[in-house]
Image: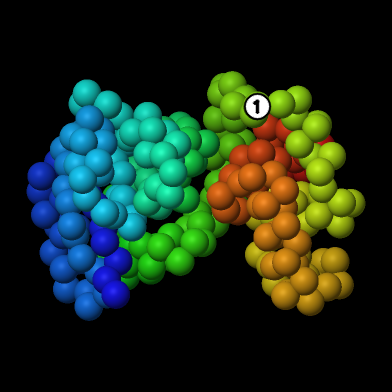
């Protein structure tokens, strides 16, 4: 069954290039396109989409607000933010809005395809270390969006889960966390899953964001 992809970007030539790359894949299909956020939201009302490739800087409604509105809907498609700059406050805001990750627009085709498949399967496609660079630069400028006192959220976690959350936020993979805590990789994966469930988070990207917002991890990667 093909992954249904929507392209949202105000640059027609860029959409054309992405469409050509995706059309060559047996497991992908571009089912919709839009030139701005307003048009994207309208199209999504009548079109079934699995993954949205979302530009951030667009007229009428930017990609961040569009992502926020998409992700607030029940059973939304996954959103993959596309940005021109590696360190871009829009990309970080997009992650906070519910995107499953971000990539550069000049990403090699193979990496883009892998990212789409990863997002579709429920994974985040931003390496935590890359996300941390964004957080280090932009987190102090952005207000928290948590709905309850931040320390209350973390009280839901066991001590071991807090340890795992800190290491996720510091950019370690499951394998590296397993080695650090002398656990099996399967056990670490279970802990990460419980963290996501208890804190009502979508993926590892949002774990990193919340770890910074709550002060569990400080800018620079240290423990809070």
Q: Position of residue 10 (x, y in %)?
A: 17, 37
Q: Position of residue 166 (x, y in %)?
A: 76, 49
> Position of 181 compared to 20: left or right?
right
Q: Quadrant of residue 91?
A: top left
> Position of 115 compared to 159: left or right?
left
Q: Quadrant of the C terminus?
A: top right
In the image, residue 47 sits, relative to residue 186, either above or below, namely above
Instruction: Name the residue nearer the viewer: 223 or 66.
Output: 66
Instruction: Name the residue nearer the viewer: 68 or 12.
Output: 68
> Position of 59 compared to 75: left or right?
left
> Position of 161 compared to 82: left or right?
right
Q: Is residue 92 visible?
A: no
Q: Quadrant of residue 112?
A: bottom left
In the image, residue 99 sits, relative to residue 24, either above or below, namely above
Residue found 27% across the figure and 26% down from its top: 61
In the image, residue 43 sits, relative to residue 52, either above or below, namely above
Q: Position of residue 83 (x, y in %)?
A: 34, 43
Q: Residues within 10 Å of mark 1 (few under 14, many from 20)?
A: few
Q: Secondary structure at mark 1?
A: loop
Residue found 41% across the figure and 39% down from its top: 73
Q: How is the image coloured?
A: rainbow
Q: Residue furthest right?
A: 159
Q: How many numbered circles are shown?
A: 1
Residue found 17% across the figure and 73% down from its top: 24
Instruction: Name the residue nearer the viewer: 2 or 205.
Output: 2
Q: Quadrant of the N terminus?
A: bottom left
Q: Is residue 181 visible?
A: yes
Residue found 52% across the figure and 36% down from its top: 96
Residue under label 1: 147
Q: Position of residue 141 (x, y in %)?
A: 57, 22
């Amino acid at each position: 069954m093909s992954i249904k992809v929507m392209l949202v970007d105000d640059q027609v030539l860029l959409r054309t290039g992405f469409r050509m790359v995706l059309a060559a894949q047996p497991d992908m299909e571009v089912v919709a396109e839009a030139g701005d956020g307003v048009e994207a939201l309208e199209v999504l009302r009548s079109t079934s989409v699995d993954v949205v490739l979302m530009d951030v800087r667009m007229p009428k409604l930017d990609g961040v607000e569009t992502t926020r509105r998409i992700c607030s809907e029940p059973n939304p498609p996954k959103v993959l933010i596309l940005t021109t700059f590696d360190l871009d406050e829009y990309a970080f805001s997009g992650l906070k809005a519910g995107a499953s990750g971000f990539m550069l627009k000049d990403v090699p085709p193979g990496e883009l395809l892998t990212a789409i498949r990863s997002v579709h399967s429920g994974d985040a496609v931003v390496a935590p270390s890359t996300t941390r660079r964004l957080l280090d630069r932009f987190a102090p400028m952005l207000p928290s969006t948590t709905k309850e006192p931040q320390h209350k959220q973390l009280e839901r976690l066991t001590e071991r889960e807090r340890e795992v959350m800190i290491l996720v936020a510091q950019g370690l993979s499951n394998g590296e966390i397993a080695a650090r805590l002398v656990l099996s990789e399967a056990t670490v994966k279970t802990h990460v899953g419980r963290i996501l469930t208890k804190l009502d988070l979508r993926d590892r990207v949002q774990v990193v964001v919340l770890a910074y917002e709550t002060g569990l991890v400080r800018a620079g990667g240290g423990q809070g």
